Image (spheres, rainbow, N blue to C red):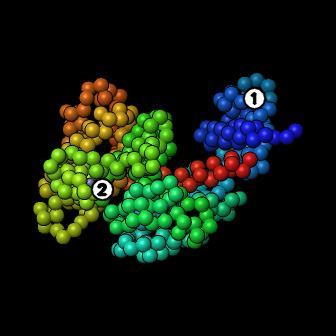
Amino acid sequence: MKVTGDQALVKKINKSLILHTIRKHPELSRARISEMTGLNKATVSNLVAELQEDQLVLEAGPGESSGGRKPLILHFNAMAGCVIGMELRVKQLTAILCDLNGNVLSEADSLLQRHDLDDVLTEMKTMIAALIAKAPSTPYGVVGIGVGVPGMVDENGVVLFAPNLAWEKVHLRELLEESFSIPVVIDNEANSGAFGELNFGRGEDVRHLLYVSAGSGIGSGIIIAGELYKGSRGYAGETGHMCIEAEGIPCSCGSRGCWELYASEKAYDLASMELPAYRTPDLIGFAARGDATAERQFSEIGAYLGIGLTNLINSFNPELIVIGGPLSEAREWLEPSMQQMVAKRTLPYHKQQLEISFSTLGSRAAMIGAGFSAAMHFLGHTRVMV
Ligand SMILES: [Zn+2]
């Protein structure tokens, strides 16, 4: 029989559906997959056999019987390959090696002194090569590299604009793919973080989620109906430049009174601390020792975080907001004033069944999400090969 394009596409979609059902629900039998997906048992059996051949699905011993022969249990083979997830921050580069289900196998990090492309690229390549060298032997090897960056990224993996790195139109995906011949996925770090939270953090089982990453600026990853919302060209989520003070401080973006000038590390009052420069961990250290100035700074930043969140809550009506990024580690001092501001200002109906929490993945959400994007990219390609 001649296979038409439509049939091949239907098969591809069905195979992908079965693979992701097995990945999300451990311990399924073929019969249970048939019930869950609505596909008939013969189709499930045939496609599971192909996935076993691809080494993406493994069969384990018999499960519980509901009468009759005990069914064989299927597992997603997370160790069919490995991926690398990386986050580029203004002062730091961090990366993990993980399996196809986001389990971390190895970690690396280094401080960045300089931001010119050559230096950063060299550092990235060294770190990636070191993690590749640590990868265990798997059927497919290292199948993808995901990178979260602090800037706007287009659909071709070009970093269009990263003001905090002074980067413009950097073809990062191309540069990394040339070096390693492994598919690379580049995304904004807030999108990566949202993807990490959705799959491994507080966001599991949530459909409408806002991930607000606060660090050297503010960016948001927006999940609507379970999908990352990127806007028409991929630039959605630049919430740090939402205006919260009509005639406020001038911003590098050309506007005034942008949220991140009041509610990120940009708001730190160095003069009052009598310090030339410090990082969030330093300020947390001061606050933890009961330094009143540090506590006051976090409390003010928390209140401004709450003002911006109120705008987002009224606009998007999310179920869950997760605060991530380096500032999330200062939860203890940010949260009271932030929650108070939201409680006072948000529309009453929007407050119902809304949870605002801090990232359980801490500052690792973006690299975990970036790695998982690379894994999903690979698994997507497997279904294209059908
Ligand atoms: Zn701005």
Residue bearing the label numbered 2: 217
Q: Is residue 120 visible?
A: yes
Residue 364 x, y percent position in the rendering:
43, 55
Looking at the image, residue 330 lies above or below residue 174: above
* Disc assigned to residue 40: 1
Identify residue type, mark 2. Answer: Gly
Q: Nearer the viewer, residue 161 or 100?
A: 161
Q: Quadrant of ligand 1?
A: bottom left
- Residue at (67, 54) in percent of width and height: 80
- Residue at (58, 70) in percent of width and height: 178
* Disc assigned to residue 75: none
Residue 14 x, y percent position in the rendering:
70, 37
Identify residue type, mark 1. Answer: Asn
- Judge from the rendering whether residue 121 lies leftward or rightward of residue 317; answer left or right: right
- Residue at (13, 55) in percent of width and height: 292
Q: Nearer the viewer, residue 259 or 96?
A: 259
* Mark 1–mark 2 distance (CA, rounded to whole Å): 51 Å
